[in-house]
Each structure stands twice: as structure tokens, then as C-alpha cells.
């Protein structure tokens, strides 16, 4: 078995070293000798195009390609307005790209329209501020963009809808007649569940954007509030309460919302507090609850609430459903160090003292399921380390962030400032445990490539069709190079 694993690892490394470029873009729009500090992509699946934007601090240079790699246009813009700090979404129409922006305090919003045909940009500042509302997250779908907020001191959710031409409107949903329970199962307002607890990101809110097609890590899925991007739907989940997972499903473009509550199986009330979380994948919800003595894992059908799988684990039992050791690793440890814990009691003690989570990825045989906990390390109030890099996106010299504009890069980069304790498990389609080696996912392959080719500049990861693209600036050739990866 050892030699099989060794051969597999060596094969993967050599495969990654030989990764051929998908596309090489000459940095020919630069001013003087400037190199890009940051890069991001916008994929238009309907028109089968994609755009790469390179930011060199003075200008933002856009390159438009068809998805079969034919150049369609390029031009230099003066960049994004300095008042704004983060790109939060886009609309796509008639080959145009409108990027939506917000400022640092999440109150002011604007946009920049990129027109490759006319080689021009148009800036728009929207005439409203979030004075009595808290920004939660955003959602992009074709030629519409949505901002989700919660009204302070209330249980009212608000959605701002923006058309591609810049017009916008607001719709509110009042859940004041619903009983939401906090972590002590005391009735509370919705705004408290969404804004008071941000253990992982240390930001004003803890709502993180999830794309289920990404190999999401515990660092992402351990957030207690999540928004799942499902195209013509998006789903907000809250797991702060002990007894329930609250699920709000928004349907577009009608802008309707359905609230569903999923009760969690409870641990014995022995004075040892439990923490819990959930994860959605397609038509299933995966729930996990643990304290230092016991763990419960449950899979349910989202529509019928039928229990498809339930696992109970006590601290004195062997973990007979794992396919990996108990792994502890992260940036707080020595470079490259990975510890393996021996006892179930160690595993439960660690994850019950961290932000618990579960992550699920479909594989050929069924499902790869990660169970564990995560700690975010040395993150300031804006989610950055040393003021430069964000969790999942960069803040270059231009000062703007793409943290949640691109959930694929957020998911890929999420391991960087975290310390996790986890087990990896394999289950078939009926959720019966199966033996086998944990397969590499596409992010594993990209990480091997970056380890063999370190010090990447203006890195980015994004999804196109059924594969992922990794991009980085090559200073020797003065090109931005894209590499294709798939499972």
C-alpha cells in the first residue's frame, strides 16, 4: 500500500510539473514597465466568452477571448474608482461586463461598465446608502445582480435588484412572525443570527459564498452563515442555533423566498456544550454536531427530510468510517508540518473547540466527505493578514479585493490562513462507507503545481465549463499565463 501511495504521489507531481499553458496573454497594454499586481476573470457562459483583467496599479487592462481562445478585444481603462474596496459581482449582456463594487464600510455601492466593442468604461455611483441595514452577501445571474441585506434590530431581509443598465429596486421580506432560536435556544431576531457571531472571518458578518462545484474546505464550510450560488436560485443557511438549521431559498427572477427549518439531533445535556453546522449539496443537507464526548453526523433529503444516513461517534470508539488519519495542519505549524492524531478523544476535543464544519464533494464512487474543525489565524477586522492578502482574494496596490467576487479562488485559497483538524471519508451513493485512497481533487493538483512553481504573482483560479483555470504572471516573458486543470 505504501509503495502504491508513493507512486501515485510521484506521478501526480510529475504530471503537475508538465502542465501545459492553456493560454498566454502578452502584457502589451501596460504603462511603462509596470507588471500586474492583481488579476481576475469574468466568464460569460451564455456568449461563450471570458475576460481577463490585469491591474498594474495605474490602469486596469482587459483582454476578451472566446472560450475556444480566439482574441475578441482588449483595451486600457483607468481602473476602478478608489472609493471602493471590493468587487462583489457582475452583470453580463451584449458582450458588455458591468462590475459592481462596494466600499470598506459596506454602505456605498457603485459599478463600472466595460464595453470592449467601444473600448470604453462608464462609472456609476448608486444613490443609496445602507444606513439602517447590514450588507450580507451578493449574487450574480446573467444580466441581473442582487444584494442581500438585513435591517438592523429586525427580522427583515432585503434584496436590491440591479439591471445591466444600472437601474435598481428593493424588495423586503418580513420574518417577524417566525421564532428563531439562538445558540441557547432563546428566541431572537434574524439580524442577530446573521451579524453578531463571526468567529471564522472576524468581520462584521460571517456570511460566506459557496459554490457546490468547488472542492470546498473546512475553512470555508465551517462558517455558520452561508449563501449557496445556484444560478436562478440562491440559498441562505444559518447554523448558529443549537436546535435547527434555517434555510432561506430565494428564486429568481420572481424574487420569492421559502423558509425551511431542519431540526438537528441533539446530544445529551450533560453540561458539555455542543457546536454544530451544516452543508448543502444538490438535494441533500449534511448536518454535524459535536462536543468533546460525542459527534453526530446526519444526511437528509432537502424535500422530504428523510434521514438517509446517521452516524454516532463516542470518544472511546474507533472511527471506522474514515479513510485518512486524523489530520491536523495549518499555517500556525511549522512549514510543511502535518500532525496525525491517534485517538478519537483528541479529534472530538479539537473540533469542539474550533469552528466545526462538514464539506462534501461528489466523486465517481459516491461522495468524499470531510468532517472536522477550523481556526482562522491572525486575521484583522477586514479579513486580511499584513494588510495585503485576503482570505480567498487579493488586495493589491489598487486597494480593492475580489474576496467573494470569485468563490472558486476563495475556496482554493482558504487553507492559507487556517489551522484545521479533520478526517476524510469515502461513501458510496447509498452513504455506505467504502475503503480506498482519498482521490485528489482539482485544487490538490493546482496546489502541487504552485508548490513546484512558487512565488506566483497576480494569481487567480476560476471555473470555465467543466474545468478550472489557474493564472499567474510570468515576469520573464512579461505574459499572463493560464493553465487548465480538471479532475
Image (cartoon, helix red, strand yellow):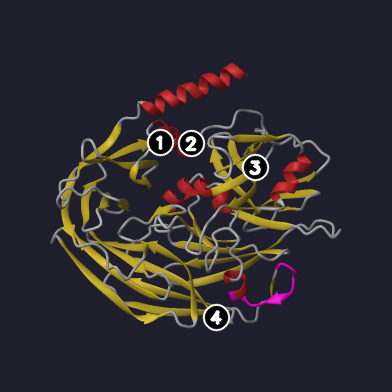
Q: Residue at x 26, y 51 (%)?
A: 54
Mark with earlier residue (4, 2): 4
The location of residue 475, given as percent across then percent down, is: 25, 39
- Left or right of 101? Residue 186 is right
Q: Residue at x 40, y 80 (%)?
A: 129
Tell me if label 4 and label 2 are in contact, CB under 8 Å. no
Residue matched to label 2: 444
From the image, which quarter does the N terminus lie in?
top right
Mark with earlier residue (3, 4): 4
Mark with earlier residue (3, 1): 3
Question: Is residue 186 rendered magenta in the image?
Answer: yes
From the image, which quarter does the C terminus lie in?
top left
Q: Which residues are magenta?
A: 183-191
Residue at the top extreme? 3
Residue matched to label 3: 422
Observer able to see residue 386: yes
Relative to 237, is 285 above or below?
above
Q: Which secondary structure, mark 4?
A: loop
Amino acid at each position: 500500500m505504501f509503495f502504491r501511495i508513493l507512486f501515485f504521489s510521484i506521478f501526480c507531481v510529475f504530471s503537475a510539473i508538465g502542465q501545459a499553458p492553456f493560454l498566454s496573454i502578452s502584457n502589451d497594454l501596460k504603462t511603462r514597465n509596470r507588471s500586474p499586481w492583481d488579476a481576475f476573470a469574468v466568464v460569460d457562459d451564455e456568449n461563450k466568452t471570458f475576460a481577463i483583467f490585469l491591474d498594474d496599479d495605474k490602469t486596469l487592462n482587459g483582454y476578451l477571448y472566446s472560450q475556444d481562445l480566439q482574441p475578441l478585444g482588449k483595451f486600457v481603462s483607468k481602473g476602478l474608482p478608489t472609493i471602493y474596496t471590493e468587487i462583489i459581482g457582475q452583470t453580463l449582456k451584449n458582450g458588455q461586463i458591468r462590475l459592481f463594487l462596494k466600499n470598506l464600510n459596506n454602505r456605498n455601492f457603485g459599478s463600472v461598465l466595460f464595453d470592449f466593442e467601444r473600448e470604453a468604461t462608464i462609472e456609476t455611483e448608486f444613490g443609496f446608502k445602507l444606513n439602517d441595514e447590514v450588507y450580507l452577501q451578493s449574487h450574480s445571474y446573467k444580466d441581473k445582480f442582487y444584494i442581500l441585506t438585513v435591517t438592523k434590530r429586525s427580522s427583515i431581509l432585503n434584496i436590491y435588484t440591479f439591471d445591466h443598465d444600472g437601474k435598481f429596486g428593493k424588495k423586503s421580506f418580513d420574518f417577524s412572525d417566525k421564532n428563531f432560536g439562538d445558540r441557547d435556544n432563546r428566541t431572537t431576531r434574524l439580524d442577530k443570527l446573521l451579524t453578531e457571531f463571526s468567529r471564522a472571518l472576524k468581520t462584521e458578518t460571517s456570511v460566506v459564498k459557496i459554490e457546490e462545484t468547488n472542492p470546498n474546505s473546512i475553512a470555508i464550510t465551517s462558517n455558520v452563515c452561508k449563501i449557496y450560488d445556484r444560478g436562478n436560485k440562491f440559498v441562505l443557511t444559518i447554523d448558529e442555533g443549537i436546535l435547527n438549521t434555517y434555510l432561506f431559498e430565494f428564486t429568481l427572477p420572481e424574487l420569492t423566498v421559502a423558509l425551511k427549518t431542519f431540526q438537528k439531533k441533539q446530544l445529551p445535556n450533560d453540561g458539555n456544550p455542543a457546536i454544530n453546522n451544516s452543508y448543502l449539496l444538490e438535494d441533500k443537507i449534511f448536518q454535524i454536531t459535536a462536543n468533546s464526548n460525542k459527534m453526530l453526523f446526519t444526511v437528509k433529503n432537502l424535500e422530504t427530510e428523510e434521514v438517509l444516513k446517521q452516524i454516532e461517534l463516542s470518544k472511546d470508539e474507533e472511527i471506522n468510517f474514515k479513510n485518512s488519519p486524523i489530520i491536523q495542519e495549518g499555517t500556525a505549524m511549522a512549514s510543511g508540518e502535518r500532525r496525525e492524531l491517534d485517538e478519537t478523544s483528541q479529534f472530538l476535543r479539537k473540533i469542539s473547540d474550533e469552528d466545526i464544519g462538514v464539506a462534501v464533494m461528489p466523486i465517481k464512487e459516491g461522495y468524499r466527505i470531510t468532517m472536522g474543525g477550523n481556526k482562522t489565524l491572525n486575521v484583522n477586522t477586514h479579513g486580511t493578514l499584513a494588510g495585503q492578502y485576503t482570505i480567498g482574494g487579493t488586495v493589491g496596490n489598487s486597494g480593492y479585493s475580489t474576496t467573494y467576487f470569485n468563490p472558486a479562488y476563495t475556496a482554493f485559497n482558504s487553507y492559507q490562513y487556517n489551522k484545521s483538524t479533520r478526517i476524510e471519508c469515502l461513501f458510496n451513493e447509498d452513504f455506505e462507507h467504502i475503503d480506498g485512497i482519498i482521490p485528489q481533487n482539482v485544487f490538490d493538483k493546482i496546489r502541487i503545481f504552485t508548490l513546484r512553481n512558487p512565488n506566483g504573482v497576480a494569481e487567480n483560479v476560476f471555473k470555465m465549463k467543466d474545468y478550472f483555470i489557474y493564472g499567474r504572471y510570468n515576469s520573464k516573458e512579461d505574459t499572463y499565463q493560464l493553465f487548465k486543470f480538471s479532475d
